[in-house]
Image (cartoon, coloured by chain):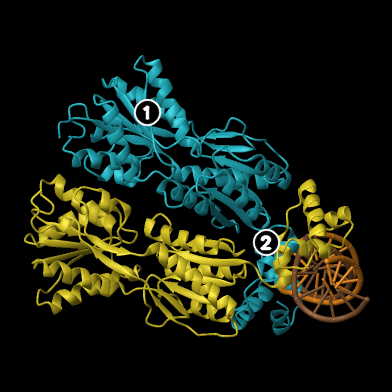
Chain colours: A yellow, B cyan, C orange, D brown
Amino acid sequence: MAEVAKYVGVSAMTVSRAFRQDASVSEETRKRIMEAVDALGYVLDLSAGSLSSRRSGFIAALVPSINNSNFSDTARGITDALENTGLQLLLGYTDYSAEKEEKLIEAMLRRRPEGVILTGGSHTDRARRMLDKAGIPVVETWEIPEEPINHVVGFSNSEAMSLLVRTLAGQGYRRFGYIGGTTARDTRGSQRRSGFLKTVEELGLGPGRAISFGVPPITMEQGGQAVVSLLERWPDTEVVLCVSDLSAFGAIMECKRRGMRVPGDIAIAGFGDYEISSICHPSITTINVDCYGIGRQAAARLLDALQGSSEATGDEITLTSYKVVLRESTDRGGAR
Amino acid sequence: MAEVAKYVGVSAMTVSRAFRQDASVSEETRKRIMEAVDALGYVLDLSAGSLSSRRSGFIAALVPSINNSNFSDTARGITDALENTGLQLLLGYTDYSAEKEEKLIEAMLRRRPEGVILTGGSHTDRARRMLDKAGIPVVETWEIPEEPINHVVGFSNSEAMSLLVRTLAGQGYRRFGYIGGTTARDTRGSQRRSGFLKTVEELGLGPGRAISFGVPPITMEQGGQAVVSLLERWPDTEVVLCVSDLSAFGAIMECKRRGMRVPGDIAIAGFGDYEISSICHPSITTINVDCYGIGRQAAARLLDALQGSSEATGDEITLTSYKVVLRESTDRGGAR
DNA sequence: CTGTTAGCGCCTTCAA
DNA sequence: TTGAAGGCGCTAACAG
């Protein structure tokens, strides 16, 4: 920067100002500075700037997995919301592990992010303490934690699954099965499961038939294996709800391979409304979640918190929408 | 850090050393320091450290889209390879746009990354100049650029597609169709397309029947639309190769909706071996690409370049593997 | 609108 | 093995 300053014949401070749109530098001077910047190929050093301005320009976000399009949609929502804010996203993958999340939070905090976006509400004590000490806004997403740290942008996975059960029960289904991962690591999965069990019970259709398998992320293949186990144990199951569309797709394909008709012999539904579910054959009944919107709104809440330091409206819960999408895979008349 | 130092009764310098495993600090002292760090909840500030050490600890990586599991696999490969190196990944999405890539490169360089991983070999002149001036190792991935900047980790998309054409021709297919996006933005897509056209010609089966549509990323739905256009124009097409498994899946589903048997009436193949292709019904013939390995190796080349400053073996091209995976969707006897 | 001074929090370097 | 001095490149704060 000193080089640019000397080249133009101004002070380094003026060059620094020229890089910020709101700073008061005459148009003439700024133009000459920018020409020099171009000529010299100078690139501003933000790490030095953030040290003195005490603003890192980073937002940290942790998602369970980036290979899951639901979460990558959320990541994209965050990225889009951050565009033109001068904030840079630091993205991390927790692999559905609270321990890995803790390590990542520490690694991220060393970069002094101005805010943090987490997935879910299940964190280690140490992670909570670190975040607390950091004194920066935190947004938890994708569910409604029992003890929110700060802001929340999400929905009740339990209620969403409950809605799906009730909707299908309203169509006449009675013998419900459920496929999901083991509960310890995937809190959203276990919430969906408990929503399923509770609702089946409430409707007098219990006890619920639930199969657990594997650790997240649940693959399509595991969905196929799980539906086989489920049907071995409870052969007269009418409809199977799955923790996600991916396992639902795997389950449907496995059933078809075994000569069963879906939805003729068995109905299957998913969760998440992945692209595949509207395209595949039969198309899959599911819960549509506003994944992208979760990202955008999480980032927006963070930006609010960073700006409105005076107003300080306090922590809030932003509920995001979800809806049942009925498709061929649970078609009551369907005998395809 | 000063606070920790005072608490323990040592200098800040000793605390700084205690954080680095290789630094010479007595075990006793380090232990006391780490206890103080815990007690005070101190978190090291890397941005300050990187300013004085002149090592940011960042690696920048740009991918076209994170919502595409091929690229998210590559991103995961990079992340995994960087684990325990103390390096942090800065990830950006270019949306298949060289202009957006240029902006992202500038934004990334302001963080002074120690290396850069790019997707493809198509960059703006300004981007090339900036990277050149930065004087850091660059790895281009996923293809073999005509004018590599530095290191390359990838494969020939053209030859891979050619191999697929030859394999299917060997099975007796003669009338080949191709579905892909418009060529300007997706260089890998256009390479696959040219590999297709060239090979069909070489085999005396030309001219190739190719349909272009939309801008990347190509969705499943667009694959369905494209195959309809293709078959309207060339109704006797025997086999359709698609720029990716996603469009292939969409094409297959659309054909089945229209009452065609796949592969009985028409055979369809994809590219990329996405999870869906082994699971769906019919399973999809495709080219398996080592997406994860591309990420791991790209990061490994970068780490080599960062360490072996003395040896300086120079730029190299690391070829990654691909292979044809024959599945049901092109089964010659298949009449399903 | 522009310049000067000081310092962000850590690490490099040198000395003990 | 430890400490002291100085500076990384930039920007806040204040002065003009």
Task: Looking at the picture, tell me which residue is in the foreground, A311 or B120.
Answer: A311
Mark 1 and mark 2: Cα distance apart in space? 59 Å
SS at circle 2: loop
Residue in the picture at 35% in, 68% down = A185
The x, y position of residue A222, in whole percent, is: 26, 54
Identify residue type, mark 2: Asp
> Which residue bears the numbered disc 2?
B22
Report crowding for label 1: few under 14, some 14 to 19, many 20 or more residues within 10 A (C-alpha).
Answer: some
> Is B295 positioned to the left or the right of B48 in the image?
left
Position of residue A180 in the picture relative to residue A177 (left or right): right
Mark 1 in CB contact with mark 2 (< 8 angstroms): no
| Residue that lies at the very extreme toward the front in this rendered image | A27
Q: Which mark is residue B273?
A: none
Q: Is residue C3 above or below residue B233?
A: below
Q: Which residue is mark 1?
A: B210
Question: Residue placed at 44% from the left, 75% from the top?
Answer: A123
Residue, x 29% and y 42% (percent of image)?
B250
> Seen from this angle, which residue lies furthest top?
B204
**Can residue B157 be seen in the rendering of this structure?**
no
Residue A219: where, in percent of width, then height? 30, 54
Q: Badge 2 local density, few (<14 within 10 Å), some, or many (20+)?
A: few
Same-chain check, marks 1 and 2: yes
Q: Amino acid at mark 1?
A: Ala
Q: Chain of mark 1?
A: B
Decide which of tag 1 and tag 2 comes sooner along the chain: 2
Residue at disc 1, secondary structure: strand
Judge whether A197 appears above or below A95 on screen: below
Can residue B323 be seen by looking at this rendering?
A: yes
Q: Chain of mark 2?
A: B
Quarter occupied by residue B270:
top left
Check the picture and name the quadrant holding the N terminus of chain B: bottom right
